[in-house]
Amino acid sequence: MSTEQFGVDGDVAIVTGASQGIGKVIAERFADDGLNVVVCSRDMDNVGPVADGINDSDRPGSANPLECDVTDREDVESLVEATVEEFGGLDVLVNNAGASFMVGFDDLSPNGWSTVVEINLTGTYHCCQVAAPHLKEGGGSVVNFSSVAGQQGAPYMSHYAAAKAAVINLTSTMAFEWAGDGVRVNCVAPGFVATPGLASQMGISADDVDRDEVDRRIGLSEEIADVTQFLASRAASFVTGETVSPRGVPDIMEEPEL
């Protein structure tokens, strides 16, 4: 059986929010495919070890850690400029950086609202717009990250749900506008995933999840990386403007059970 089409196109990728969890695994998968991956987060101390792990392994691709706050336009411009200077171009952009906290809508402050919207939505806007000229040079691929919360809402996360809903709409709009430039734009909207963030909020770790069990509500970072790798690969050459929702047995409105 041929599997070559599932290799990620291109030579260079940027993965934001790559210090842990989903972003970290995506970066490792891209390096497995031979890509040079720029891994970034707001704190170099967190993302540096991710790059070291990739570079110290036998993966054919390499990793370059960079500090970047995606809400800061100048930071994003420096990120993209450094990537192109180091590797000569940019083929894949994964907008995984995100953040949230739980609060009832009535108690949500203007600062809390703007902070979450800036990271999840405006950060995606910055990265896509700054990277656009380089992605369009060779016909690249963008994978944005939303959430099932952005598809159907989520109690006590109205700011996050609203921002992630906007990311879905932004994805379909960009896909239409950039198709003529040979750039595919897709979105991943995961359900509950056993990341360090979920572990801190709900006490659920990846060790609690049986990947072979279909009837479950918690996924693994590797399963989300599988979808991202597909969307960035040649196997998804006829897929653009789509939102894929890996979420297991659905109903985000209920508390998940193992």
Image (cartoon, grey):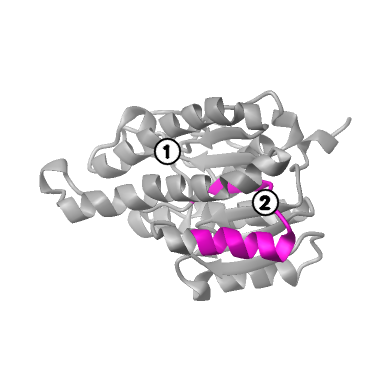
Coordinates of residue 244 in the picture (x, y in percent):
54, 30
Q: Which mark is residue 245?
A: none
Q: What residue is shown with label 2?
A: 90
Asked if the stretch drawn in magenta spans residue 91, the answer is yes
Asked if residue 118 is among those painted magenta in the image, a careful observer would answer no
Identified by mark 2, the residue type is Leu
Residue 147 badge: 1
Label 2 vs label 1, nearer the camera: 2
Nearer the observer, 5 or 200: 5
Q: Please give the name of the residue rendered at 64% of the width and 39% of the height, measured from the top-left corner.
A: 141
Q: Quadrant of residue 178?
A: top right
Secondary structure, mark 2, is loop
Label 2 vs label 1: CA separation?
Answer: 25 Å
Crowding at mark 2 (Cα within 10 Å: few <14, some 14-19, many 20+): many
Q: Which residues are magenta?
A: 77-96
The answer to whether residue 13 is left or right of residue 60 is left
Q: Position of residue 37 (x, y in %)?
A: 67, 58
Within 10 angstroms of label 1, few (less than 14), some, or many (20 or more) residues?
many
- In the foreground, 150 or 93: 93
**If the image is split into quadrants, where does the N terminus sit?**
top right
Residue 19 visible from this viewpoint: no
Whether residue 41 is visible to the viewer of this picture, yes or no, is yes
